[in-house]
Amino acid sequence: MHLLLFDIDGTLVRTNGSTRAAVEQALSDLVGRQLHTEDVRFSGKTDLQIMAEVFHANNVEASETLVRDALDVYVSVAHPGMTSSDVTVLPGVRDLLDHLHERSDVCLGLVTGNVEPMAYRKLDVVELGAYFSFGAFGCDDADRNRLPSLAIDRAHNHTGIRFEQTNVTVIGDTRRDIECSRASGARAVAVCTGHYSRQDLSPHKPDALLEDLASISDALDALGVGSPRSRNGSPASPRATR
């Protein structure tokens, strides 16, 4: 059994900038003055880390309590306002997830810097959330390198299967996704659908590097799960629950 742990932003979907605007609004409302995020890169980071860095960039002394409060305010601002018009599914993603969901030898999970409610909101508005019953999220730990091991533990709790690291793959679009997979002993597959090119990602030596997920056969080879096959040979809608 293979455990495939997907990043969200830049890997499965792309958002239109509403997330950054929501962070600015939430943190500004919390501290009572305008804060700016232009000096903080969001890609590959956990939401806990992003909140702390935005505070630091704006000379706000941020305790752990304040950062956690910022996450709550951010969710209250961003969650109800996000719609399908804010999220674009990246090339090949829906077909690939359809196929992987039908595999009896594959288990799907998430490793994402998004706080859990926002992770599922981004996926649910484009009907991808039901593929993923568990994961590790940006509210679990500020250090992304700790998330894959947590996701592996949750996969065991969800399925009863103890996954060996050699059968776990993290799929993401940044060097931080590659680094966190290495920290957990998992394989790393990188895609060039976020803010980083092949030239940016190649020096970090992922096990496989794809321009995108548009080709199912290429993606399956990169993921190490072989040629296309399904349990019953026919497509089906996602049935996972969380």
Image (tube, rainbow, N blue to C red):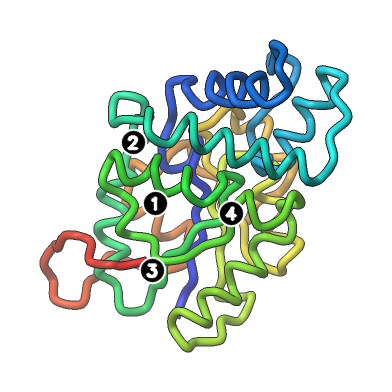
Q: Between marks 3 and 2, how big is the CA–CA gap?
A: 24 Å
Residue under label 2, please give it. 89
* Amino acid at pointer 1: Asp
Camera-nearest label, 4 or 2: 4
Q: Is residue 154 above or below residue 206?
A: below
Residue underneath mark 1: 218
Of the image marks 4 and 2, the number of the one nearer the N terminus: 2
Q: Nearer the viewer, mark 3 or mark 2?
A: 2
Disc 1 element:
helix
Q: Classify 128 as above or below 24.
A: below
Sequence-first disc among 4 and 3 = 4
Mark 2 element type = strand
Q: Earlier in the sequence, mark 3 or mark 2?
A: 2
Give the spatial CA distance, label 1 vs label 4.
Answer: 28 Å
Position of residue 43 in the picture relative to residue 5 (left or right): right
Q: Residues within 10 Å of mark 1 (few under 14, many from 20)?
A: some
| Location of mark 3 (residue) | 226
